[in-house]
Amino acid sequence: MSSKHLSRTFSFSKNNKAFPSPRIRPYGPRQVRSYASESADKSNLRPLVLEKPDKFRPPSHPSRKPAPRRSFGPRLTDEEIAAQKTKQYPSMMPPEGSFKYALLTARRFHAWFATSILVALAGATFYIDFHSKNKYPDLLPPASLLWSHPIEYMSQYAQVYKMHKQEEAAENLKKRQRKQDEVRKRREYMRAHGIEHEGPYGLGTVEGDEYRKKMEEEREHLSLEEQAREELVRSLRAQRAREQEILDADEVRGFDGERRKVKKWFGIW
């Protein structure tokens, strides 16, 4: 608003008494008027006390809203609920009381089923291993004899299995004797050529070189008889140690102190 317009407004209000002059209030915080009497007597004011009810009246509404129903439509009847318990739904457990439910929840059935599978796998493994390594395949009874004379079939089968195990034991004994003969021949060869056992240290190491140097110095100071005696004692000790290693691999010492052959179950362990 321009200054000329303000001057005209004020001049018009002064000349015309019907229009009072406007009051210009200063800018400042808003004032709030209170019409309550501050000098009234407050001694008679007391808190409101509700009257004691004559009987219990339950509330008209619960403390929280009822949960919405997840199924839309009318409520199911008792007949429909009973029919749902006997109905088979896809990808779900069968209803209670049915044969499938009793079969799937029976612990004895599951134990029998797992045991039968393990026994079948063990029998198949034994059958395949025996027939692949059998030394006498021609002596096995024919399969037709199992249905006509099962007892005779099992007795012949057991005899062939026993012969097979005896043959395996004989082969293992021959292998062990062959190793012992190799050890004996190696010992005799080393004794004939004057080769000494090197001991725990290998060739080309500092410990091995020092050990050989020390033995050479000691050999120079010994006489020929003492040297021969020492070589014989060392060869015998080495022979006993190697033979003992071979025997310990196939024998075990009992509680009475006697050595016995290791009993292997099924020829494996």
Image: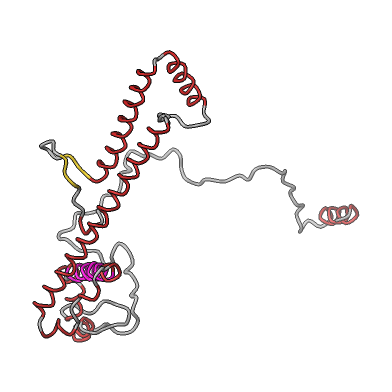
Residue range highlighted in magenta: 112-128
In the rendered structure, the answer to whether residue 90 lies left or right of residue 195 reads left
Q: Residue at x 88, y 52 (%)?
A: 7
Tell whether position 50 is magenta. Answer: no
Looking at the rendering, which quadrant does residue 185 occupy?
A: top left
The colour scheme applied to this rendered structure is secondary structure
Coordinates of residue 140 in the picture (x, y in percent): 20, 76
**Camera-nearest residue between 180 and 192:** 192
**Camera-nearest residue between 91 and 73:** 91
Coordinates of residue 62 in the picture (x, y in percent): 28, 65
Tell whether position 123 is magenta. Answer: yes
Q: Is residue 6 above or below residue 186?
A: below
Looking at the rendering, which quadrant does residue 172 occupy?
A: bottom left
Quadrant of image for the N terminus: bottom right
Q: Residue at x 46, y 22 (%)?
A: 211
In the rendered structure, the answer to whether residue 143 lies left or right of residue 46 reads left
Q: Is residue 223 above or below residue 9?
A: above
**Camera-nearest residue between 139 and 121:** 139
In the rendered structure, the answer to whether residue 73 lies left or right of residue 204 reads left
